[in-house]
Structures are given as structure tokens and as C-alpha cells.
Image (cartoon, coloured by chain):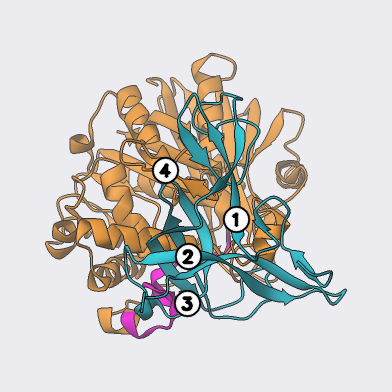
Chain colours: A cyan, B orange
Amino acid sequence: MTASTRAVHDGLFRVDDDGSVHLLGGYSPSSGKHHFPLLPACPYTGTEDVEAVDLSDHGTLWGWTAVTAAPPGYEGEVPFGFGVVELPEGLRVITRLTESDPARLEFGMAMGLVVAPLHTDSDGNEVVTYAFEPAKDPE
Amino acid sequence: MTGVQITGIGLHPFGRFDAKTTTDMGVVAVQSALRDAGRPKFQAAFCATAYAGVASGHKVLGALGLTGVPIVDVEAGCASGGAALMLAAGAVRAGQYDTVLVFGIEKMPKGIIRSSFFEPWREEAGLAATPSYFALRAQRLMRESGITKQHLAQVVVKNRANGVDNPDAMFQKPTTVDDVLASRVVCEPLHLHMLCSPNEGAAAVVLQCDASSANGVTLAAAVLRSHLPGSVLGEATPMSGIDDSDITPPSALAANAAYEEAGIGANDLDVVECQDTDAARELLSYEELGLCAKGDQPRMVDDGTTARGGALPVNPSGGLLSKGEPLGASALGQVVELTTQLRGAAGARQVDGARTALAHTVGRGANAAVVILKT
């Protein structure tokens, strides 16, 4: 990330030098379950054997809508897509969607992880977050 | 909970009252409830509120010269009033007090509810829009239970028709399916008129043990539950979740415990007030409260089961869709309505033969409250 780019929150995602994006989660070997974002204990069992892991960068669309009016504390553009993507780990993740027209989305469609702009903050930084976009059709 | 009775009820209408403070509204509700109960001395007071601030219960009782007893503010989101009622009833049942005042007051900010529940980064990322979570839940219910937008609109029409006869409701005009579907889309599939309005109001009840009041209604159960982890669209609004098909939602946890406490089942209910923050939330409540099997909501809506003249009227007060939602006052407003129904004093809103009633609220936390009243 360049100096003029700021992640909306630390610990949600990582962008590697090759440009690949990774969602940062946790895994508890004793419960066999993943979670996001990383927590100090497994949210399902309370055990503290949590390992930091990179979650899948793709999944399927499980829920979607569009936010049409700016909610409190949000300075970006509307409408924007909002939904849930189910990762291969069985984890359902709350996320922004790059597609803001609900009619162009459908249940179960393939989605991929990207970094998306939110707004420019008062210091001139471009604030970015993770988001999912419909996977490109293979040509 | 045999022995705990509701002997007084009071309400300040729900709506927008720019010239009034929460204290003003609380005073009206508390005075009315105490008068209704025959002005008993109470040994403790619980005040439900989410937005009123520090020691807001003291401000209400201070204005009435009724301080000296313990006064405790209780916050449990949309279920705050249910939480206050649970604490009060437990204290009465345990013999700590014989008379307790429970009231709820609220003056909600206008627009989409801003909740300190969400971290600032989540607001900045646009992941804190309450209606968008309602929308995803509605979409899932439609996908899994065969509910259509038409059904959602019919719920609004039913509740607004009931609200016509409620002088304490914010909206007292009927609406039509066409009008509901013509209102703007806030978050697909939810249109503006399918969402309740956050607003202002107050409600109060007096609890007494072993009272022999002619107006008394038995508080058979008052239960609060939080969520079990795992449901990504649950009211706890986590950032992630897992397959939740075997995870009991908080409303069902509260309802099951309340049925057990009251010694009744859903089949015994004559009338229900349930959380209809949006039209889909009411339909989801039907299955969570055991009023119908999963997926049976379309039939319930189509055949009028839950209309005022139906087999099991739901939200005869007009629900939150007519009354609006002042968080701290909401659950107690339901209890005031159902006590009125069980007294047979609901006038044009009266559900014939109402003897057993259930009130349900659920929201942020998650917090879910279920209250059961019996004559």
C-alpha cells in the first residue's frame, strides 16, 4: 500500500507486494472452526487455541442488498453493495460488494476478494477496505 | 411466577414531541401507572432506556418527589423494557420487594439509528447500516420460506389497519399493498414503509405480589436471553458466522424459557405483540416464537390468521410499524397494550376472549425478551 492509502482498520486484510489480497482470520484446531476478524478466543467454544490464518480469497454470494442512503459515520458514495459471502471454510463474512445493483447479483454466484476505496480522509489519505466482486467469467 | 401481578399501567403516546424531554414523557407514564394501581408505595424502581443518559430514571422520579428507593437504569437495546421487567419480577418473586415500579423512556435520534454498538471503523466502512442487516435477513427469509414482497406489504397493511384504532400510535392511517410497494426502496427488498420509525415515548407498569386488584393481570413469565454465537445475520451483528441451522436464535431461547416458566405452550396464546421493526422481522418472529412452523408464514399472512379477527391476532396495537419504536419504552408499551387487552378494555382494538398474551422484543446485543401475561 502506498503512503497515501490507509486501511479502514488494522487486522482485517493484507495486501502483498504482488498485489494479492488476503482476509485475516482465526482458526481454532480444537473446534475446527474459522472466524473473522481474528479474536483472542474461538467465538464458538471459548477455547484460546486460536491461530492467525489467511482465509480464502474467494467464495459464493450468500446475501446481498444495496445501501441507498449514507448510514451514520459513513462518508463514501451511495448506493453501495453490501452482503455476505460464504467462504470455502464454511465461514459467512459480512462485506461490501463492488456491485451496487441488486438485480445484477444472484445467490451462489462466485465472488472474489478485492480492495475497494471508501473515501479520502481529512489528511488526504485514500481510505480503503476489503470487498468482494463478482468473479470474472473465464473467457 | 404466580403471585406477581401487574396492577397499574401508564403510557405516554409514541411519536415525535419536539417540545418534550424524556423526563416529561416519563412523568406522564409513571403518574398514570401509579394512579391506575391506586397509588401504592413502591420499594424499588427500574427504568429502561438506551439513549436517555446518566441516571435518567432518577430525573423522572425526582420530578415527582418519589426518590429515596433504589432506582436502577437498565439498557438491553430493543428489549430494555423486558430486561427491566425481568429484574423487577425476580425481586418481587424472591420476596425482596412487594411493590416495584418499572418504566421505560426514550427520545430517539432522527434517521437511521446510530448505535455505539458498532466500532467507528465499521461505520466508516459502511458496515453499520441497520436497515441493510434487516434487508439481508428479509432476503434470506424470502428465499427459505417462500415469502414474497407482497407478503411483507400485507404485514404492514395489517398492522397499520390495527393502528387506526390506537390513539397512542404515531401512524393512525391505514395503508395499501400498492402504497407500501410504491414507497422508495431503502435496502432491497425492504421499502421505506416496511420499516418502523425510531421515535419517542414512555410506558410504565406497577408490579405487586399477591395483590387482589380487580384490574390485576398475572405476570406469568418475564425472560431475557442473549444470543448463541454463529448466526451472521443475528441481532448480535457479528462480522462473520457459520452454518446456523442448528443454532437456536435468542428469541426462541427466550420464548422457550418463558413458555416453561408460565407452564403454557404457544397453542395457549390468544394474542401476541411481537417485534416488527421491519415487516420481515414480524414473520421471522412467528417461527421463532413457535406460532408457526418454519415456512408456514405465507399461509398465516394469506389466510388472515394474525389479523385482529383471526385465530391468533399479532400486534393488535398496530405494532412498531404503527407506533414507532422508542427503544426503552417499546417492550413496556407492549405490556401496557396486552394488559389492556386482558382487562377487556382495549375498545375498538379488543381481541375477543383474550386471556393469555405474549410480548416479544429483540434487538442489538443480541437481547431478546419474552413476557407472558395471564388473567
Q: Which is closer to the viewer, label 4 or label 2?
A: 2
Q: Secondary structure at mark 2?
A: strand
Q: Tell me which segment is drawn in magenta.
A: B181-200
Q: Are marks 1 and 2 in contact (CB under 8 Å)?
A: no
Judge left or right: residue B157 versus residue B3: left
**Up-down: is B67 above or below A17?**
above
- The spot of residue B334 in percent (x, y) is 42, 49
User: Residue under circle 4?
Assistant: B242
The residues bearing labels 1 and 2 have C-alpha atoms spaced at a distance of 11 Å
Q: Is residue B190 magenta?
A: yes
Q: Which residue type carries mark 3? A: Glu
The residue located at (49%, 32%) in the rendering is A44
Q: Which mark is residue A112?
A: 2
Judge left or right: residue A10 versus residue B146: right
Pick whichever of labels 1 and 2 is earlier in the sequence: 1
User: Residue under circle 3?
Assistant: A99
Q: Is residue B212 visible?
A: yes
Q: Quadrant of residue A105?
A: bottom left
